[in-house]
Image (cartoon, grey):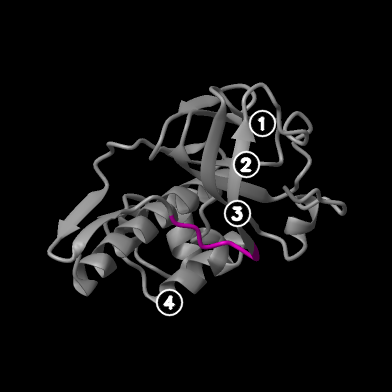
């Protein structure tokens, strides 16, 4: 994928994130499109286009809308992801160019802390923190290298195979275990608070 194509893909991701957040926050505030447009000093058509993910705002417009909603502008661009984000091995988010093949798995803009892990999980051995879901404002994202993994919210865990990808929250009960023998994953843990990763790493660790 050429640099211009990367920019186009990223632009679409940002527009979609902004559209979801703007519509949600405006609705939570009980504001109509017309009312928000008037408060922010922008055209009604601008709000409609932003909520339809068909326009990119200027920085000035973004800041005016955020101020009118009573939030920081970064909140409008933050990927909330209350539901698991799942990418199957044979999804349609793959781009092939002369230099190789690239598959877009995810994007997040509201990260304060980030940890990258190479993990192995064993069958019938539940991750101990999962049932508690006690890691505030913390999210896990996992790419399955080999084996099969059951992961995600306890209410609706998902079976994953090699080359599948999932992102889910750790501040609600979740499941994380291999289904057959051992599952190998490349994983990340991120938090929207600077101290968020302290909830993930135990003080005493056993090195295998």
Relative to 165, say whether 115 is above or below. Answer: below
**Dot placed on the residue nearer the N-terminal end, 2 or 4:** 4
Return the x and y of residue 206 as percentages of the image width and height.
80, 48
Classed neighbour count for the residue bearing mark 1: other residues with Cα under 10 Å, few (<14), some (14–19), many (≥20): many
Q: CA distance from mark 3 to mark 2?
A: 16 Å
Where does label 2 land, which residue?
Answer: 169
Return the x and y of residue 43 as percentages of the image width and height.
34, 65
Q: Which residues are magenta?
A: 107-113
Where does label 1 land, which residue?
Answer: 174
Q: CA distance from mark 2 to mark 4?
A: 30 Å
Relative to 126, say whether 165 is above or below. Answer: below
- What type of secondary structure mainly makes up the magenta span? loop
In the depicted view, which residue is nearer to us: 119 or 153? 119
Q: CA distance from mark 2 to mark 1?
A: 8 Å
Q: Is residue 65 left or right of residue 123?
A: left
Return the x and y of residue 65 as percentages of the image width and height.
49, 66
Where does label 3 land, which residue?
Answer: 117
Tell whether label 1 touches label 2 (CB within 8 Å).
Answer: yes
Classed neighbour count for the residue bearing mark 2: other residues with Cα under 10 Å, few (<14), some (14–19), many (≥20): many
Tell whether label 4 touches label 1 (CB within 8 Å).
Answer: no
Which residue lies at the image location 62% right of the left edge and 35% below the top edge? 121
Residue 172 visible here: yes
Which residue lies at the image location 48% right of the left edge and 55% below the top edge? 35
Q: Secondary structure at mark 3?
A: strand
Relative to 81, say whether 14 is above or below. Answer: below
Tell whether label 4 touches label 3 (CB within 8 Å).
Answer: no
Q: Secondary structure at mark 2?
A: strand
Q: CA distance from mark 1 to mark 3?
A: 18 Å
**Dot placed on the residue nearer the N-terminal end, 2 or 1:** 2
Where does label 4 land, which residue?
Answer: 59
Relative to 41, say whether 46 is above or below. Answer: above
């Amino acid at each position: 994928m050429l640099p211009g194509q990367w920019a186009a893909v990223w632009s679409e991701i940002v527009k979609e994130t902004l559209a979801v957040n703007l519509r949600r926050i405006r609705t939570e505030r009980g504001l109509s499109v017309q009312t928000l447009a008037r408060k922010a000093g922008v055209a009604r058509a601008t709000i409609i286009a932003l909520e339809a993910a068909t326009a990119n705002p200027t920085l000035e417009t973004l800041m005016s809308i955020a101020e009118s909603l009573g939030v920081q502008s970064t909140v409008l661009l933050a990927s909330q992801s209350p539901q698991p984000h799942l990418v199957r091995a044979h999804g349609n988010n793959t781009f092939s160019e002369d230099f190789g093949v690239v598959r877009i798995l995810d994007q997040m803009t509201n990260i304060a802390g980030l940890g990258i892990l190479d993990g192995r999980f064993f069958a019938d051995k539940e991750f101990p923190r999962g049932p508690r879901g006690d890691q505030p404002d913390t999210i896990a994202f996992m790419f399955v290298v080999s084996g099969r993994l059951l992961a995600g919210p306890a209410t609706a865990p998902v079976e994953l195979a090699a080359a599948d990808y999932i992102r889910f929250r750790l501040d609600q009960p979740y499941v994380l275990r291999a289904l057959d023998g051992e599952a190998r994953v490349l994983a990340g843990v991120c938090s929207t608070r600077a101290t968020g990763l302290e909830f993930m790493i135990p003080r005493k660790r056993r090195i295998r």
